[in-house]
Each structure stands twice: as structure tokens, then as C-alpha cells.
Image (cartoon, helix red, strand yellow):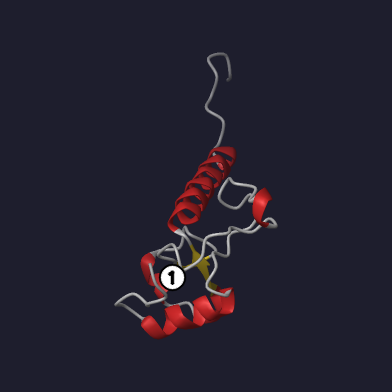
Amino acid sequence: MSRRPPLGAPAVWQVVMEAAGYRCHCTAGTCGSRHARSELRCHRTADSYRLIAAPADLLLTAAEAAALPAGELLAWCPQCHTGALARQRAAARDFARSQAPEPAGLFDL
């Protein structure tokens, strides 16, 4: 891999990567990995992986994410992005279930 920006929004990608030191921003537990062997931060860099710029809140719509300034985006390696997205979706489902009204029981009147 290389530190070449993607085709879309290369200037934004460059700003995000420079702020991250060309290293995945993921920290302990965000993606499900503790990253214990790399000071609690993902060890993957743009030298070996195709890093992407994405918001910390991965549940934003594409339009919401595109409207964010570069300062609100993080560098993500593909593995951490996938893991963090799955964890955020699960947390959102759990929250939605906790907010749903209890179904009426058979003997409730």
C-alpha cells in the first residue's frame, strides 16, 4: 500500500491522515480489539493498509458524514472500521429494544 489518497476528496483524506500520523485511530475496545500489544491503539498504518477517513459515529448517513469537517473525521483501517461499525449497530439495536414498550402479557388487563 501507499500513502496515496483515494480518488474522492484527497485533500480531506490528507488532513485526516496527517492528524492521525498515518495510523488507524482505533483505540482499546472501539472495534472489539483491545489493541493491547500496540499501546491500546491500532498498529495499522497507511504504509501497509488502505486507511479510510470516516466519522467516529459510523451510524451517520452518507450525507451527514460527507458534511462533517475534516477535523471531525478519524483514520480507520478496514478491520477496525468493520468491527466498530458492527459494535455501534449492536449498541443501537440494544438501545432501541430497551426503549420499546413492553408487549401486553396474556393476563394483563
Q: Quadrant of the C terminus?
A: top right
Identify the residue at horizontal 66%, vertical 50% (top origin).
Answer: 37
Q: In this view, does 104 lie above or below 43?
A: above
For label 1, the SS is: helix
Q: Position of residue 90 (x, y in %)?
A: 51, 43
> What residue is shown at x 55% (from left), y 75% (from top)?
72
Q: Quadrant of residue 100?
A: top right
| Residue extending furthest toward the bottom | 11
Q: In this view, does 29 lie above or below 9?
A: above
Residue 23 at x, y percent in the picture:
55, 68
Q: What residue type is labelled 1?
A: Ala
Q: Nearer the viewer, residue 98 or 59?
A: 59
Quadrant of the rendering where the N terminus is positioned: bottom left
Left or right: 62 in relation to 55: left
Q: Mark 1 points at which residue?
A: 65
Determine which quarter of the picture holds residue 95: top right
Mark 1 nearby-residue class (10 Å; few <14, some 14–19, many ≥20):
some
Task: Single out the residue that lies furthest toward the left.
Answer: 7
Residue drawn 68% across the image and 55% down it = 40
Q: Which residue is more in the foreground, 105 or 87?
A: 87
